[in-house]
């Protein structure tokens, strides 16, 4: 089963169907900023839909419930909550009893795929640099290295010591 993020105007009513424990910051990194909540008990929410042709669309929502100072004094601000790396037990709403487990697994998979090891990042950078021109590499090197790097042409760089 595949899912996609949708926005409020494309969502039919949902009711509490389950929970998912993830860090708010991970949701933002993978799905972008949440839609606004009700400004009382919910500060933000996401909406998703199944991707199926010629069949009734199933919708899901992920939302925090009474977790911010919007709902109760003394709780973290919405900004602080949504930037937290601490896992939170989010509510999941749905307009169906079907596909809840698949939806939870999909969300967790999307979050897991957003993380890269240092080796994976270095490989991706290397693959990009192989295709880049010398001026681009020169610019990047000067931003991250403490020594001045000067592109000499033909994949050759000179390091200038200060």
Image: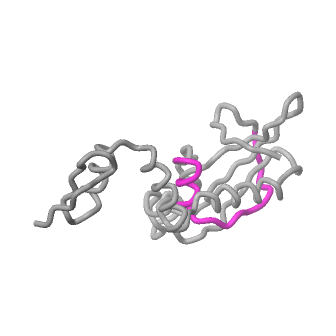
Residue name at image x 66 percent, y 38 percent: 6
Residue name at image x 29 percent, y 56 percent: 141
Q: Point out residue 80 in the picture as x, y percentages from the top left corner.
A: 44, 63
Placement of 156 over or under 13, stated as above or below: below
Q: Point out residue 153 in the picture as x, y percentages from the top left corner.
A: 27, 45
Residue 20, magenta (yes or no): yes
The single residue placed furthest to the left in the displayed view is: 162
Q: How many marks?
A: 0
Which is more toward the observer, 41 or 145?
Answer: 145
Placement of 62 over or under 95, stated as above or below: below
Tell me if 143 is positioned left or right of 75 in this view.
left
Residue 27, magenta (yes or no): yes
Tell me if 154 is positioned left or right of 161 in this view.
right
- The magenta-colored residue range is 13-32
The chosen color scheme is one colour
Tell me if 13 is positioned left or right of 154 in this view.
right
Tell me if 86 is positioned left or right of 61 in this view.
left
Q: Point out residue 1 in the picture as x, y percentages from the top left corner.
A: 83, 47
Q: Point out residue 86 in the picture as x, y percentages from the top left corner.
A: 54, 71
Placement of 59 over or under 73, stated as above or below: above
Residue name at image x 82 percent, y 41 percent: 58
Question: From the image, which quarter does the C terminus lie in?
Answer: bottom left
The single residue placed furthest to the front in the displayed view is: 154
């Amino acid at each position: 089963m595949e899912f996609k993020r949708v926005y409020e105007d494309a969502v039919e009513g949902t009711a509490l169907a389950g929970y998912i424990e993830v860090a708010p910051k991970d949701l933002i990194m993978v799905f972008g900023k949440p839609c606004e909540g009700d400004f009382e008990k919910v500060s933000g929410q996401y909406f998703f839909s199944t991707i199926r042709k010629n069949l009734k669309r199933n919708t899901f929502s992920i939302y925090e419930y009474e977790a911010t100072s919007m709902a109760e004094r003394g709780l973290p601000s919405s900004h602080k909550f949504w930037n937290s790396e601490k896992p939170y037990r989010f509510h999941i709403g749905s307009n169906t009893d079907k596909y809840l487990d698949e939806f939870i697994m999909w969300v967790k998979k999307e979050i897991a795929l957003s993380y890269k090891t240092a080796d994976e990042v270095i490989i991706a950078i290397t693959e990009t640099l192989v295709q880049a021109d010398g001026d681009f590499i020169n610019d990047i090197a000067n931003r991250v290295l403490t020594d001045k790097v000067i592109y000499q042409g033909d994949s050759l760089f000179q390091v200038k010591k200060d």
